Image (cartoon, rainbow, N blue to C red):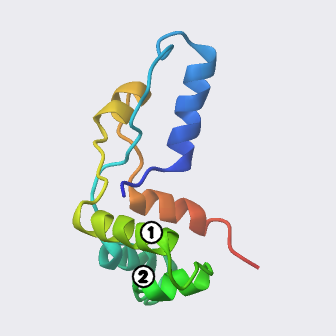
């Protein structure tokens, strides 16, 4: 999946609500880059100043956490969807977001740095 900083999305929403240039539009809002989970963990480690390890639970682990039925069409359908997206990721292009904002979209690193300004207590 493609990433996007919620502050950039909020800025686009403000433009859409206050100007006419986005009327009747459907827009792909994506930040630049296509980081995998290891790269995301590396960025988070950089921001936090300590190692963060990436982990991808298997389908069965996930299905058990969300309490999908052990058998049946729902489970089989979800498994097929997960397998398809693992092989065919949804990737977007930041060109539209850049054009709407009139500047480069924030990067994933900038997003994590912004989050780190509000420590969890």
Per the image, the residue denoted by label 2 is: 59
Please tell me whether residue 23 is drawn above or below residue 38 in the rendered image.
above
Give yes or no for contact between labels 2 and 1 (Cβ–Cβ under 8 Å).
yes
Q: Give the left or right position of residue 4, taking residue 64 as reference.
A: left
Residue 74 spot, x, y in % from top left: 51, 69
Task: Classify the position of the C terminus by image quarter.
Answer: bottom right
Query: Residue visible at 45% across and 75% down?
Result: 44
Per the image, the residue denoted by label 1 is: 78
The answer to which of 116 and 52 lies nearer the viewer is 52
Q: Earlier in the sequence, mark 2 or mark 1?
A: 2
Residue 35 placement: quadrant: bottom left
Please tell me whether residue 36 is drawn above or below residue 52 in the rendered image.
above
Q: Residue furthest top?
A: 20
Query: Residue visible at 35% across and 39% down?
Result: 104
The answer to which of 39 and 106 lies nearer the viewer is 39
Q: Give the left or right position of residue 20, taking residue 30 as reference.
A: right
Residue 106 spot, x, y in % from top left: 42, 48
């Amino acid at each position: 999946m493609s990433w996007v900083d919620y502050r950039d999305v909020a800025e686009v929403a403000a433009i859409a609500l206050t100007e006419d240039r986005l009327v009747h539009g459907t827009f792909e809002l994506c930040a630049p880059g296509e980081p995998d989970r290891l790269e995301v963990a590396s960025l988070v480690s950089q921001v936090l100043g300590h190692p963060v390890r990436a982990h991808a639970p298997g389908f069965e682990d996930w299905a058990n956490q969300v309490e999908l039925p052990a058998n049946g069409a729902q489970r089989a359908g979800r498994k097929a969807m997960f397998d398809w997206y693992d092989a065919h990721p949804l990737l977007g292009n930041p060109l539209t977001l850049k054009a709407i904002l009139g500047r480069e979209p924030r990067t994933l690193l900038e997003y994590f740095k912004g989050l780190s300004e509000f420590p969890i207590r």
